Amino acid sequence: MSSEVPRILDRHRRLSVHSAFGTSVNLRAGRRLINCSTGVISSPNGIEMTPGDLRRLQRLHRTTPAGGLEWHPLDRVMTSRTGCVVIALTPRTVVFDTALPRAGGGDLSVQAHDLVEHLARTRARAGLGGDWPALIADPTLTAAVDSLLGGRADEAVGHWMGRGPGLTPSGDDVLVGMVAALRFTGAIDSSSLAPLRELVDTAGGRLTTEISAEYLHYACRGMVNGMVRDLLVALDRSNTVGVRDAVDRLSRYGHTSGMDCVLGVLTGLISASDGQPPSGCAEPSSAQAFRP
């Protein structure tokens, strides 16, 4: 489980099932959501549990949608209101840290350009399309990077919040990737992100889905899922095998959520380094043509 989860549980002991899906369940704990799944995703707010525990949560949601859960901090056990144990933490429970490290200080734009070329050759697709050079050069995306670099959460950033279909719309996933890349390289820090944090915390649930707002909440605090973290670290180390592995895993994360995060990472790294789109890029069109 994420190192954030015990802190959330200890602050909010009365829980409820927010939403349930085939492979995951989201629990509400106060204003926060806890993502429960059986996969190794390493979400900033995630618990990776046994299939049996997940089935019990899904069953609870089906049979008693309004039923609640309670967290018992001394016993480290989560139970339904009927007393049935749903999740029990043990000394063997692995607690992982999803905080982003800091890049080594080199220019990552060369590695980012190489990855753009690879994605174009392999015809990989993000939610905004598959023309990677055009997407990276799109002014509506680079404007969002410029705003983040300037410590703003203005229309250029707000343009992408909630944009696109899905539980985590493509625009939000792109912003998560951008924020992660810029924090990783030190181009922005916590104070720079104060306006975006405030926007997400005060209006995130109105501008986008609650699940998506949760990931933006953590990205602003320097926490992302393990696959995005692995991608950034591999790029920093010029580890081509590691980069390809992280992208492969992200390509299977959600419908297009993982690849939308990759797009945000690459746009952030290249725009922050160059200050302009890479030379030879096609006239931007894909992202501008995208509509919710």
Image (spheres, rainbow, N blue to C red):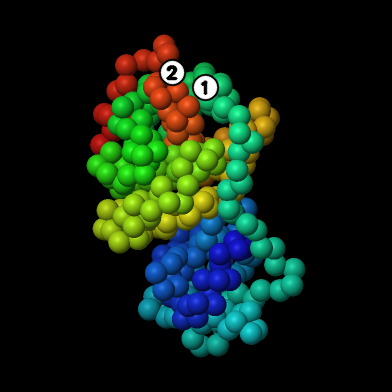
Q: Nearer the viewer, residue 285 or 149?
A: 149
Q: Name the residue: 33% across, 26% down.
A: 138
Q: Residues within 10 Å of mark 2 (few under 14, many from 20)?
A: some
Total labels drawn: 2
Find disc 2 in the rendering and name its residue.
278
Q: Mark 1 points at which residue?
A: 113
Would you say the residues marked 2 and 1 are in contact, meaning their CB atoms lie under 8 Å apart?
Answer: yes
What is the x, y in percent for residue 153?
Answer: 31, 46
Of labels 2 and 1, earlier in sequence is 1
Q: Is residue 269 left or right of residue 87?
A: left
Rendered-image quadrant of the N terminus: bottom right
Work out whether residue 194 or residue 41 is closer to the camera in this orientation and state it: 194
Of the residues shown, which amino acid type is indicated by label 2?
Pro
Quadrant containing the C terminus is top left
What residue is drawn where x is 64% and y is 85%? 74
Q: Nearer the viewer, residue 25 or 176?
A: 176
> Horizontal placement of 38 versus 267: left or right?
right
Q: In this view, does 173 lie above or below 267?
A: below
Badge 1 amino acid: His
